[in-house]
Amino acid sequence: MVSVQSRVNSTERKRITRDHVTIALDPPADTNSFSYAYATVVLNGLDFPRQSDVVLEAYYRTSSMRFACGKVEMPEVPSRMELSDIDVGGAIQFRLLIIEPESGRILGSAEGLRAAKRGESTDRQPLLPLRETNLGYELWRLDVDPRIGPVLCVNNAVPGLAGQIRNGPLLQGLILPHAFRMILQEMSAAGEDEGDDLWGDDWRKFLKEIGVQVEPDNHDPDTIDDWVQAAVTTFCELKDFISRVRLEPLSGEQ
Amino acid sequence: MRWYFRDISDDPSEKELTQLDQFNNDEVGLAEALVRETIQNSTDARADTSPAVYVRFSITQPKSERHKRIFLDIVAGLSLHLKACEFPSPAPNDPFQLLVIEDFGTAGLIGSVEEKDDKQFSGFWRRFGRSNKKGGKGGRWGLGKLVFPSASAVRTVIGLTRRIDDVERQWTMGQSVLRNHSINGSEIDSVGFWCRSGGSKKGLPSDDRELCNELREAAQLVRGKQPGLSLVIPFVLQELTREAILDAAIRNYYFPILTERLTVSVDDTEINSQTFDRVASLLPKGAVSRSTLDFVRHIQNCRSMEPLLVIPQGWQEIDKGITGDLIGAEAATGLRDAFLAGRLIFIRAPLLVQDKDGRQYGTSIDLFFKRTQTGERGQTLVVRGAITVPTEGKRSTFLDCNAALIADDEFISRLLGDAENPAHTQWNERAEKLRAGWQNGWRALRKVRSALQQLHELVTVRIERDDPFALLDFFSIPKADRGAGAPHPTGGRPANLPPARQKPFRIERRKGGFVILPAQLTEGAEFPLSFRIRCAYDVLSGNPFKRFNQLDFDLFKAHRGTNPPKGLLSIIEVNAGCWATEPNQLDVRAYSAEFSVAVMGFDKNRDVVVEAQS
């Protein structure tokens, strides 16, 4: 199978890749307070008019807040953004907008930005976020947003399910290889649009890191299946699910 | 003073204390069992006049040969019995260390020293397998006290107590718990007493001032005239180290320490609410998590306040529980909102318990919940009186929140204490003391056990959140090292990947539409070439193809050729044929390498996402 994807950019809006924005989030304190966000915005190398406005928008479901962050020539992000109008309890996301002051036209944007917990620092970039959400009768599901990439969703109606996926080798071993298989099958095509967020290429880097070839040139479905299976096998071997499960007694067998 | 072991040759039954292993096993190590037993009893024995209890552990050696000789002489009296039990007797040059345990702010071993009664003196020295606990205070010396001789290579403990009702006098005696054994053809009981010699009654303590003072000096006790109990364990086992005791105290008693009801010292290290963090930081990582400590401190701050909700008494009835119906929709919503907002939820659940004589007591448990932060693993704390009951906590672990069940009201603490195993790690609905002491005690216990779970189900439904780092260990790549001042990438394919494989077609953008053309390198491509095109208006979040709606556009109605009527899409094919298979999907058959398929007429204010697949 060969797949090519492109975006017809009628609005001529530029996509800003996520590495231009870093956001940290302080969860609300225990009293009646709000989350606080802290951000850095670096627009070097992006070809926007210098007088364009820079705006950071926080949103969760239908609630949102906008914070003016200066001009492209000199971004000035507020030192601390109190998210007082955002509905509590949700996974707050952000978008960065570059706006033409005269017309209000959006010249560029970075969408679906997620915050790291404040103080949480890692030298690695996570590829698969875990989302606790309402999945009806399903326990888990892999959602793939063509622009942002895959998200592993787990049903928040089951208390502790997400925690077990975070920490329990059994559920990890049952779910993650299959999720990986689905990601490989849905992996976005190597993009042709320079403005696109190429999440697929992050996963190709991951494949390279675990010693697996990127997609074969031969597009025969059997060849693709073999490639996916080889990648999943390598992943399972590296993560050693069997040994980890053996080390922890299965609940119900005590 | 001499050793007295009962001759049981005429006893037709055969009884042996077999519970020693309960205090050194996979679940609870010896240091932990010893610390738990000591502090649990000391905090239960807190004097009414004392707001807090102080427990002192010290591993020491006698300062002089004379002092050492006092203990060696005591142990020498045991040597025949040790030999008969095939326990090694210490050699003169064996390392000799004492473990000293003293409690302060307690009542001491009250009750008759001569008669068996249901008070603490008898409970500690004379009774095995059954607690003497009758009230919320006073200590419940059951099988747990066997941990003290278990900590000695010669299975021996020596005690000295001053009692709150008679602090001028001090009483001392000792005990050795061995095995049933035979000496000179006589069958000898496993339990021996180091006790007053002479007199018709055996196994009595001494209040000889000179003896007691000599013992205090030899063991370097710090007790003056304060009531309480001092224990001296000679030839303490090597595994009982200062570090092991510190670790056990921190891990098991962080709750009463942080809530200022207990201070513990181990040699010269004091653990109280102020020094806790500093001492804990010296222990191996993971002794008690930071979030648990913060949670306990938060609970402590809240306990002086009114609870957010007092559950209606009806929750205790059969077939009822803590439900939205019981507390009402408004209260349930309030709890959920508070939980969602990350606030600490403090709920009191009243209970009625009834003792074996039919007397009813109103009591309560306090329940706490607080949502964990992203990536944080929830822990559940179950506290009975001042002691944590770890296995009960593990049974109710919620990975998405920290929770606590505090049962420190006198009557529920008594009831749950009667259900506790000797190591104080869990409760048992069928415990003998529970059945004997309470009417339907098992039912009250079952309600207590289920309270956290029911409340959790009530408050935690439908929490939505993202955790980008949850699977970092499984799926991640090194962050791009931009370096200071390095230009940011503007997107596109990373340079260090293999070249993208060749595609037989490409997508070009046009104003208001797109066109599919053959790729420049079509060597080897075979015609006719079939492929499928999907298109949809882009959306801010989510999958645009899933969010497509027929009202956006309809390829079934598309005009063929240029100059379409207003509002319709147009499809222009060259050397290709195409037909709509969905409102946003075209199947294409290209006949030669000069093919093109253009779709025009989209809303120019919206971006279009196009995907072509063969």
Image (cartoon, coloured by chain):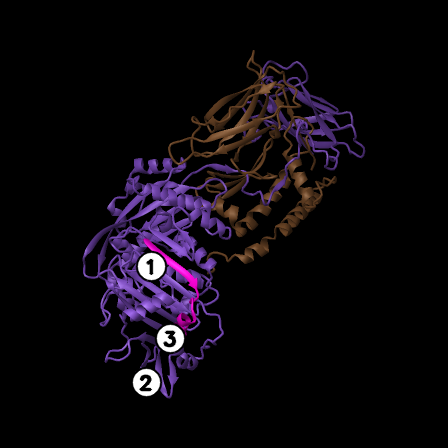
For the residues labelled 2 and 1, the Cα–Cα distance comes to 39 Å
Q: Nearer the viewer, residue B22 or B202?
A: B202
Earlier residue among tags 2 and 1: 2
Q: Point out residue B591 in the picture as x, y percentages from the top left corner.
A: 76, 28
Magenta residues (range)? B53-73
Q: Point out residue A87 in the picture as x, y percentages from the top left corner.
A: 43, 29
* Callout 3: SS: helix
Residue that badge 1 annotates: B103
Residue B9, numbered label: 2
Q: On the image, which quarter does residue B554 sit in?
A: top right
In the image, which lettered chain appears purple?
Answer: B
Q: Point out residue B370 in the picture as x, y percentages from the top left corner.
A: 40, 42
Protein chain holding label 3: B
**Same-subunit check for callouts 2 and 1:** yes
Q: Of tags 2 and 3, which is closer to the observer? A: 3
Q: Of tags 2 and 1, which is closer to the observer? A: 1
